Image (cartoon, rainbow, N blue to C red):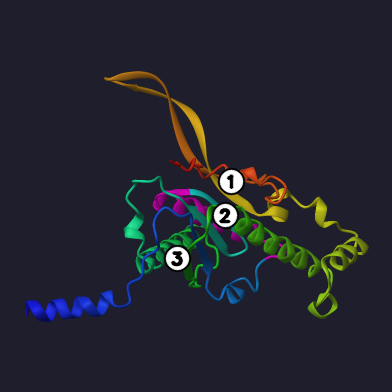
Amino acid sequence: MEHFGERMKNYEKSISHTLPRNFPIIMRIDGRAFHTFTQDLRKPFDTRFIEMMNFVGIEICKEIPYVRVAYLQSDEINLLLYQEIGQESWFNNKIEKMTSISASLATAYAMMWKYEHDFKPHTIITFDCRVFIVPLFDVINYFIWRQSDWERNSLNMLAQKYYTQQEIQNKKKEELHELIFTAGDNWASLPTSLKNGRCIIRKEYTKHVENPYFSGEVIRSKWIVDKNTPSFSIERDYIQSKIPTYEIETD
């Protein structure tokens, strides 16, 4: 029976994959088939949907270790994970564990928020997840890419408020801006979070503690939504500062 068990475990190991250590890890959690779920939401931007995604993003950041920052746009949550050298990795960087747990957490928290806020309570939503490493120098470029994707999406969403899909199809960004302006609106006047997306970052705060062993101010931190997330291509340090840099030792 012992050999039987070992053989079964070997089958499992044959498809087990792990990420190398000491590299920045990107985890992208995506809503599965959300085009159906979002079909009847308020246009162009539904605040309830945004609040739900913000809640999911914050709870995910609390649950997953080594998260440095999360970027939210549309139905996706982009996490940057980076552990200090010598720290134990999450699930030993096993891809199957990392992706399945993360997608499950996102699904659970989204469903929780939906029911608590009576937001389409009779619908079921799920998330999928992919995880991969990127070199240090390309971390910022990944987030610039995702933010650029959102800029295009938000521009399209605002244009669809005034025009049909056929009228805006294959239009360049400059043309969409002109169409929106002609309709009496201006994409540039949108709140920053609708133009740039939102980041979830750690913010320190001071708290007074009173107990038999200590009385005084202590510094705590919590995850918050930064609704003034800047353009990453302009303020590159916003993302790059989340990863420590090490000098390479030479003989």
**Which residue is under mark 2?**
139
**Label 1 to label 2: alpha-carbon separation:** 7 Å
Q: Residue at x 85, y 56 (%)?
A: 186
- Residue visible at 81% across and 67% down in the picture: 159
Graded by Cα atoms within 10 Å as few (under 14), some (14 to 19) or many (20 or more), the crowding at tag 3 reads: many
Q: Please tell me whether residue 121 is drawn above or below residue 218 in the rendered image.
A: below
Q: Which residue is mark 3?
A: 107
Q: Is residue 56 a member of the stretch shown in magenta?
A: yes
Q: Name the secondary structure under disc 2.
A: helix
Q: Which picture quadrant has residue 5?
A: bottom left
User: What's under tag 3, amino acid-wise?
Assistant: Thr
Task: Judge whether 13 appears above or below 208 on screen.
Answer: below
Region rendered in magenta: 42-67
- Name which residue type carries label 1: Gln
- Looking at the image, how many numbered discs can be counted on the residues? 3
* Sequence-wise first label, 1 or 3: 3
